[in-house]
Amino acid sequence: MKFIKYLPVAILLVFFVSCKPKTKSMQVPVVGFVDAFEDATISQARKGFTDALNKNGFSEEKKTVQIEYSNAQGDIPTLTQIVNHFVTDSVNLLATCTTLSTVTALQKTKHIPVFAMVSPTAERMKVVDASGKAPTNLFGAVEELNYIDTSFSIIPKLLKPKGPKLVIGMIYNQSEPQSADALNRIKSLAAGLNVDIVALPLNTSADAQLVTQSLLGKNIDAFFANPDNTVFASFETILKNCNQKNVPIFTSEAGLVQRGAVAAFGADIYQWGYQAGEQAAQFLKTHKTDGLQPEMVKIRKRVYNPAAAKKYNITIPPNFEPVK
Amino acid sequence: MDFYLTALLQGLCFSAIALGIYISMKIFNIPDITTDGSYTLGGVVTAVLLTNHQPAYVILPAVILAGATAGALTGIIHTKLKINALLAGILVMTALYSVNLTILGRSNLPLINLPSLFTIVNVVGDPNQNTFWILAIFVIVITVLIGYLLKTDFGIAMRATGNSESMIRSLGVNTDRMKITGLALANALTALSGYLVAQFQGFADISMGIGIVIVGLGSVIIAETLINWFKLTSVWLSLVLVLAGAVIFQLVLAFTLSVGVDPKLLKIVTAGFVLVIVSLPRLSLLRSS
C-alpha cells in the first residue's frame, strides 16, 4: 500500500495543473458563459458568441474581456451552483446556452442581464409573469416554432409517397419542452398537408437504434429529425439505419444536414450564438440595456446535402444552397 | 462567501435525500434506485401544486405521500414478488418517468414569481440568509423526527432487520412489512429533497433526478467514513454526520468551481477531492500503524 502515501500529492498535482489562473481585474468586463451539457453541435453557439464579441473588440487575447466558461455536463445541481457562482461573483453579464441554463439563470438573478441562445421564447419557457411580461433581464436570441412550418412543408414538395398518403416518421424527446412542442406543431401541420405522422419518443441516445428501427418498420417515406439533444447525440445511428432502408432524412437545423440529412430550413446554431454575442457586445460597450430585448433568430438557412440528395434522386429547389 | 452560502443551502436541500439513502442503504442494506424517480416526483408534485396556488400545508403532505407511495411500491415488488431489490427499484424508477411527465404535463416547469417555502416568513432581509434559517429549521425538524423514530421499538426493530433478518424474524417481527415501511420512509425523505430543491433552484425538470442517487450515496459514504473514524455508535451523531456529508459534497463542488477548474476536468477534480476526504482517516491510520 505504498502508493497510497503518494495519493494526496498526485491529486494536488492534478488540481494545480487543472487550475486556470484567475485574474480578477476591475477594468475588464467579465462574462459568465453557462453551458448545460457537452455537445458538438450545440458548442457552435459558444463559438459564434465569442466570435461576435471578438469582432466588436472584446477578445480574451487582447485582455479586453474575460469569458468565464462553465459546463454542467448534464447535471442540474452543478448547473445551479455554476449560476450561483457567477451571480455572487457579480459578473457583468450571463451568456446562457440552451433552455435549462437560461431558465436557471433567470431564476437566480433579476439584475444581471442574461443573454440567451439556443433557447425558446419566454412564453415557451414559461418564465413570463402573471401579466404576460418576460423577465426584464432577459436578452439574446430566441426562437419560436414558426420555422418548423417551412422546414416541414418542403417534404411533401420534394417527395412522392409510396402509398396513397405520405407517411413521415419522427422522434422527439419528452424531456425537452421545445421538442414536445415541435411535435404538436407538426401534428397540426400534417393534417393540412395530407400527411400521416408516426412519432415515437426517444429520451436517451442509448435507445436510438431500437426506436429508429421500430419507426422504419412502419413503412415511412421520410424521416423528420427534430433537432433536440438526443437527436444531436445519436444522429449517426439514425442516419445509418435510414440509409439502409433508403429513407431520406429532413430536419430544421443546418448542422444535421452537414452530418447527412437531405435538406433543412432553420436556424444555424453558430449564427444563433453570434446574434446573442452581438447583443452582449452592445451591452458591454454602452453598459446599458436600453434598446435591447430578446430578438427572434434572424439568420435561417435553406441548405441541402448534395450527396444525400443525389442518393435519393431528390431535385432541390434553386433557393437552397449546398452545405459546406 | 455568499457563493459558499448558496452551496451550503444546496447541501441542506440534499440532506433529506442523504437521510433517505442512509435508511435504505445503511439500515436495510438495500441499494434503492427508486431515488432517481421519487426525487423528481417530489419536485414535480411541488411545482404543479405551487403553480395551482395551493397552500404550503397541502403541498408538504402531498409530497411526502407521493414519495412514500413510490417507496412502498418498490418494497412490495421486492418482498411480495421476491424480485431483486435493485431491479425492483429500477422498475419503479423507470415507471415514475412517465408518471412524472404526466403530472408535470411538460418537461420543465419554472416557478418564477411564485411564493415558496423560502418566502413564507422573512426572518432576515437577505434572501439567502432567510432561506438558510428556514432550511435549517426544516432539516432539524426532519432529523429530530427520524432520530426519534430510530430510537423507538419500531426503529430498533427496523435497524435489526438490516443487521440480521433471520434473527429478527424468529422474534416474531414481520420483516416484509418492515422493509416496505422503511423504503416508504426513505423515499418520502427523498421526495422532500425534491420538494426543497425545486423551490431552491426555481424550477422542476423531468431530468432533475438523473444520477441524484450518487449525491445521496456520496453523502452517506462520506458520513460513514467519519462514523468509522470516530468509532461512533450514537444514532444522533450518525444522522448529523449524514447531514454534514450532504453539505460537504456540495461544498466540494463549490470549491472546485470557485478555483476555476477547466470545465472538462470538473468531475474528475470533484471526485478527487471527495477521495481525499474519505481516504484521509485511512492515511492517518496507516501512518500511525
Image: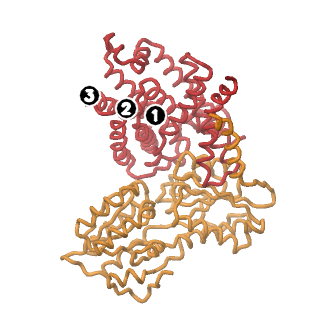
Q: Which chain is red?
A: B
N-term-proximal mark, 2 vs 3: 2
Out of A187 and B15, give the one closest to the viewer: B15
- Of marks 2 and 3, the one in the foreground: 3
Name the residue at the front extreme: A2
Amino acid at pointer 3: Lys
Q: Quadrant of residue A233?
A: bottom left
In the picture of the structure, the residue carrying the numbered disc 2 is B71
Label 3 residue SS: helix
Q: How many marks?
A: 3
Label 2 residue SS: helix
Host chain of mark 2 = B
Q: Residue at x 41, y 66 (%)?
A: A235
Out of A136 and A225, give the one closest to the viewer: A225
Quadrant for the N terminus of chain B in the image: top right
Q: Which chain is orange?
A: A
Residue B150's spot in the image, x, y percent?
47, 17
Out of B15 and A246, give the one closest to the viewer: A246
Res. B190 mark: 1
Residue A269 visible somewhere in the drawing:
yes
Residue A35's spot in the image, x, y percent?
57, 57
Residue B203's spot in the image, x, y percent?
50, 47
Q: Quadrant of residue A60?
A: bottom right
In the picture of the structure, the residue carrying the numbered disc 3 is B80
Disc 2 crowd, CA 10 A, few/some/many (<14, 14-19, 20+): many
Host chain of mark 1 = B
Host chain of mark 3 = B
Residue B53 visible somewhere in the drawing:
no
User: Looking at the picture, do discs 3 and 1 lie on one chain?
Assistant: yes
Residue A296's spot in the image, x, y percent?
53, 70
